[in-house]
Amino acid sequence: MKQKFSDVSAFRHDPLRLFAQKGFGSSAPLVQLNLGFKPVYLVTDPLLARAVLKTDEAKIDKGYLVQKLRKVIGTSSITMSGPEQQKRRAIIHQHLARGIMNDYVPEIAGLIRRHAAFLVRENEFVAHDVTAPLALRIVASLLFGRDVLTSGDESALMKAVYTAETQMADGLFRIFPRTPWKAWRDYQERKLSREIMAVVVDRVRSRATSTSLLRAFDALNLTTEELRDEILLLLLAGHHTTGNAAAWVLYFLATEPGLADKIRKENLSLITEAGEVDPLRLPRAEFSLRLAREALRLYPPFYWFSREVREPTELGGKQLPKGTSLIISPWQIQHDPRNWPEPDKFRIDRTYNSPAYLPFGLGPRACVGIGLGLLELQLLALEIATACDVEILSEVPAPAPTPAVTLLPPRIRLRLRPRAPVSAVAQHTAA
Ligand code: HEM
């Protein structure tokens, strides 16, 4: 009985260490984790992980974790499956595809510059305190269109996102059920923030710009509540993911010798006569792209996710009963020395077509925001490195990240010093 729960404490307190202990060097493609009565395996072999993720959802799906999520964030394309999910996913996918994202490049670059112009006046700042709200603002702007939300609307949405995130973290790592009082209070808090959010969505629905994602959802005839849940999902999915990785992008710009110069030089080859990045040249911008990819290799925001076997299945030489949970940890796979030489080291000379690179997942439920996530990280690197010198004020190497719902960066304290006079940065921003 005790044996069945022997990994629970390690999983709650230091999942990265548990994944490292169980995964690195294990010759078995599936390693058992003792997390309760149900069988749970860590999938350590990247090829097997890919096969699991690509398996038809009728055989292996997202499983019980989704039920937990649904309680907190409602029913949306991350917590549904089947034809309705596929329809919604297709709309989001189409809208966030890299080709369409190109039209948003000036908008996203503008938001980054506005933040930079503000930050150069600060004596210091904590990277993640800035990058997470920036990521949220970028997603909100794609969802609704530029300047559609008032600051009151924005605060209501942020409140709903933070409430959902806090409750997700609490639910995910909880072993004992909450007291009825705490459960009731959480429910009330969730209900209130989602009701307020529905009012905002209903109000801005008609004002959303014709190119916004909200308008694209019109084709689905969703109710206000359904639309609200989709919006909450997208704000959540695009927040502590890109926001976390962006903090590491700034950290590497500050600490990797010669990196910022390379990115600056790259920027020169990308800008048009108007001084804007040409989106069509971005996929060939190798240094900024590698910086983004390496940050996601070292610190994948979704450091683990899971699947559940829906029918008895043979996998990795084991016969798995229905209900078996499979944990895939991009962090473990991307730090395993068998997959990556010098796995803990930042290296700008890597290539990422390895099967052991999975920061966005894979298969029918892979991230739909890949194009947007990479674009944001690349633009952040290009805009900041070009306009500013990034100085690190906290310790190097940085302390380890904190594994919560996502892999949260430590308090990386930075200072931005304008390379051009502050007035020029501000002028550029206003343009
Ligand atoms: C660097 C940033 C990002 C990373 C590393 C990331 C990672 C991931 C991963 C690993 C999954 C799959 C989880 C699983 O298989 O269970 C996922 C799903 C998802 N992501 Fe992202 N994501 C990022 C940015 C974004 C952005 C910016 C958006 C949109 C605004 C987004 C929207 C979604 C959605 C909607 C899903 C659910 C897809 C489905 O279930 O069909 N992500 N993301």
Image: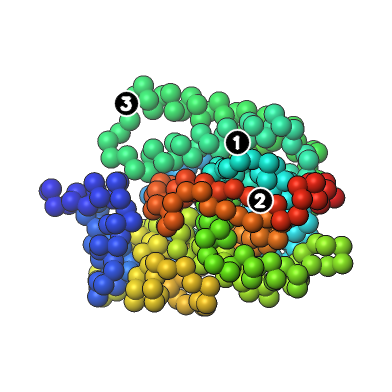
**Labels in figure, total:** 3
Q: Quadrant of ligand 1?
A: bottom right
Kindly report the distance in space between the C-alpha atoms of the residues bearing marks 3 and 2. 50 Å
Residue at x-position 57% and y-position 29%: 193
**Residue 122 image label:** none
Given residues 422 and 262, the one toward you in this image is 422
Q: Which mark is residue 179?
A: 3
Mark-to-mark CA distance, 1 and 2: 29 Å
- In the image, residue 344 sits, relative to residue 177, either above or below, namely below
Residue that mark 2 sits on: 417
Q: Residue 166 location, x and y as percent? A: 46, 37
Q: Residue furthest top?
A: 181
Q: Residue visible at 70% across and 71% down? A: 265
- Upstream in sequence: badge 3 or badge 1: 1
Q: Which residue is mark 1?
A: 158
Amino acid under disc 2: Arg
Q: Amino acid at mark 3?
A: Thr
- 30 left or right of 332? left
Report helix, strand or loop for mark 2: strand
The picture quadrant where one finds residue 231 is top right
Label 3 packing within 10 angstroms: few (<14), some (14-19), many (20+)? few
Disc with the residue nearer the chain's start (3 vs 2): 3
**400 vs 226: above or below:** below
Q: Give the residue displayed 80% in from the left and 38% down from the top.
A: 207
